[in-house]
Structure formats: C-alpha cells, structure tokens
Amino acid sequence: MKVKLLHGVFVAILAFVIVSLILPEVAYYLTLTFFPYQSKGDPLYFNGEIVGYKYVYMNISIKGYFNSTNPYYMSPIISEEEAIQQAYAINLSVGVPLNYLKSLVSNYSYYDLLTGKSLVNVNLLNIELLGFYKNNAKFYSYYLQGIKRIECINKTIDYQ
C-alpha cells in the first residue's frame, strides 16, 4: 500500500514537472526554430526597415520611451494602467503632451479575455513615438537616440 502511494505521488510530481516546466520550454524553442516569423509576430517597420517584431520586446530603455515591466520574459505586453503611468513619466521627463500619450495608449490597448485586463504592446507605442519624435524638431534628439538603440539591438540580436 505504501509503495503504491509513493509510486502515485512520484508519477504525479513527474507529470507536473513535464507538463508545467519542460513541455512549455520545448514548445517555445521548437516554435522559434521551425516557425520563427509566427512565434515572433508580425515584423514592425519604421521608414521601410524592419526594426523588430510584434511579440519580441525591443528594449529601447532610454528616457522618452515606453518599457516593458517584465523584460526577463522578453514580452512587450504591459497593462493599460502601467502604460498610463509611464505616459505620465514621459510627459514629466521629456515634455511630450499628455493628451497625445493617453490617446496613443488608448488606441493600442485591447481587452485580453485570458487575464481580464486591458493590455498594450509597448513596441507599437514606441514605433509611434519614433514617428512623433522624428516629425517634431523639439524632440528630434529622442528620435536619434531611439534609432541608435534599435540599431544596436538589431546588430546584437539576429532578427532574421
């Protein structure tokens, strides 16, 4: 009886480890290997050049841009509340009009049924900010810094 119980517990723990830890990792790397464009999401273009992909976080990480709160997972998805908080910070630190930032966040937010939250992709927000910075002389230096950072990321990470 005791042996059967221990065997059952061992099988349950092994099944848990396989299903919750090993299987997702294997699936993740298989999709990256065999379906790179599908797993990365649609390519993101700026000025006709690919600057990144929709589901791979472009860590611009400089003042004036939105950032993911979970860079460890390389996910560009954050909650709408976090994006609004970052919009206030960008407004205070850089001077981008708050109305523009709020409308940008609301234009790109979507409701996720799985989490029950409104979410935003910061890559899409940052692509729009690049255009805003490029077309406004007051903010042109932030455009140059953002492009330089994206070029640096694209040189160190093979997106193709």
Image (tube, rainbow, N blue to C red):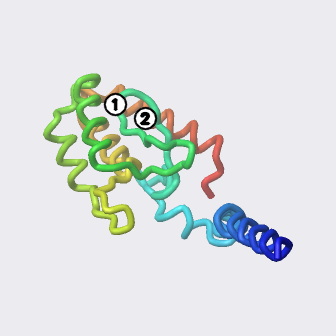
Q: Quadrant of the C terminus?
A: bottom right
Q: Quadrant of the N terminus?
A: bottom right
Distance (Cα) linking label 1 and label 2: 9 Å
Q: Residue furthest right?
A: 3
Front-most of residues 156 and 68: 68
For residue 116, side relative to residue 160 (left or right)? left
> Relative to 131, is 148 above or below?
above
Front-most of residues 32 and 42: 32
Query: What element does badge 2 sit on?
Result: helix
- Categorize mark 2 by other alpha carbons within 10 Å: few (<14), some (14-19), many (20+): many
Circles 1, 2 touching at the beta carbon (< 8 Å) = yes
Hey, what amino acid is under mark 2? Gly
- Categorize mark 1 by other alpha carbons within 10 Å: few (<14), some (14-19), many (20+): many
Residue 139 point in image, percent of width and height: 28, 28
Residue 110 point in image, percent of width and height: 28, 61
Residue that label 1 marks: 64
Residue that label 2 marks: 146
For residue 37, side relative to residue 18 (left or right)? left
> Relative to 129, is 79 above or below?
below
One can see residue 33 in this view: no
Give the residue displayed 49% in from the left and 45% down from the top: 58
Residue 118 point in image, percent of width and height: 28, 57
Hey, what amino acid is under mark 1? Gly
> Relative to 97, is 16 above or below?
below
N-term-proximal mark, 1 vs 2: 1
